Amino acid sequence: MKALVAIDLDGTLLNDEKAVSPGNRQAIQEALAAGVDVVICTGRPLAAIEAILEEIGLDSADHYSVTYNGALVLANQGQEVLFEESLTRADLDRIYPVLYDLALPLEAVGRDRVYQLPYPAGYPGQYGDQRDFLPTEQVRLADLASDLTFPKLVVATVPDHLDAQIPQLPQAFYQDYSLIHSVPEELEFMAQGIDKGKALGILAERLGYRQDQVYALGDERNDAAMFAYAGTSIAMANSQPDILEAADYVSKSNNDDGVAYALREFILKKDEDLIQ
């Protein structure tokens, strides 16, 4: 079957225990056996998903992942980079002081570590410590090399405080960067125009897929761009309201093998119907 299926992780492939269910794992194997290309699209770095890729059979150089919400697309083995668009040290120099004055803690997420910059009093950053995806390093801004790049910058703090401060951000930030507020406690800064949809489009073209051959499965606002790009979008039943509204189809929840249901009912079954 000629299809590229992009699957989000948290809230989609993973259940609330952050695990891949046996049902979802089996359905992915069925899809791969049918010739479907499966790509993971996540806000996480590759290092944080390697065990999952191995578990579901995508841990090879001929499979790819969209990581950092679209800032980096690379092979799952060998880490061949297909696309990368990161923020620079100059961007960090511009953003950090503004957020510090707004009492918003900023952490710079690199390819191999999270740089924890000095926090505003009373508002420690929570990304590096709670996510535990990459090693963390506490640094001063002046200590960072001028040639460092960062797939994303993250504010992770108390949701009510974040919501109160977001309206105070300079409008120029919205013009010059992609800002993603997909979960209550986080605000992410990425290079302008970067999202899962753009990255998925680049990958699809590289692999020879038409847009109508691309399927996207997700649940949160950072999945909206890949829903807009994909020929067919499928939301989990637990999705945020705007994602449910944007989807072509709604599957079961992430705790009820929603990915397995989507693969079988909306993708693999469609191919069977065409054959019949």
Image (cartoon, rainbow, N blue to C red):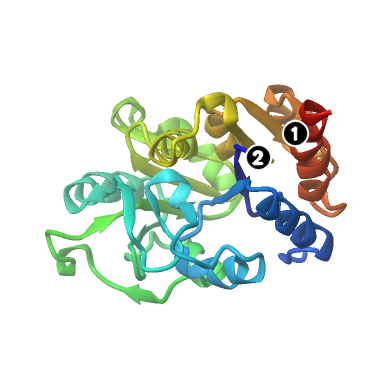
Taking 144 as reference, is 158 left or right? right
Taking 82 as reference, is 32 left or right? right
Name which residue lies at 53% across and 67% down.
Answer: 59
* Sequence order check, earlier mark of 2 and 1: 2
Q: Say few, some or many: other residues with alpha carbon within 10 Å of mark 2 (under 14 / 14 to 19 / 20 or more).
A: some
**Circle 2 residue:** 1
Taking 275 as reference, is 51 left or right? left
Mark 1 element type: helix
| Labelled disc at residue 217 | none
In the foreground, 26 or 14: 26
Do callouts 2 and 1 mark residues in contact (Cβ within 8 Å)?
yes
In the foreground, 191 or 62: 62
**Circle 1 residue:** 271
Amino acid beneath label 1:
Asp
Residue 55, placed above or below residue 228 = below
Q: Position of residue 230 (x, y in %)?
A: 57, 29
Taking 139 as reference, is 223 left or right? right
Please say whether residue 175 is visible from this viewpoint: yes
Name which residue lies at 46% across and 63% down.
Answer: 76
Please say whether residue 238 is visible from this viewpoint: no
Amino acid beneath label 2:
Met
Mark 2 element type: loop
Q: Position of residue 228 (x, y in %)?
A: 56, 25
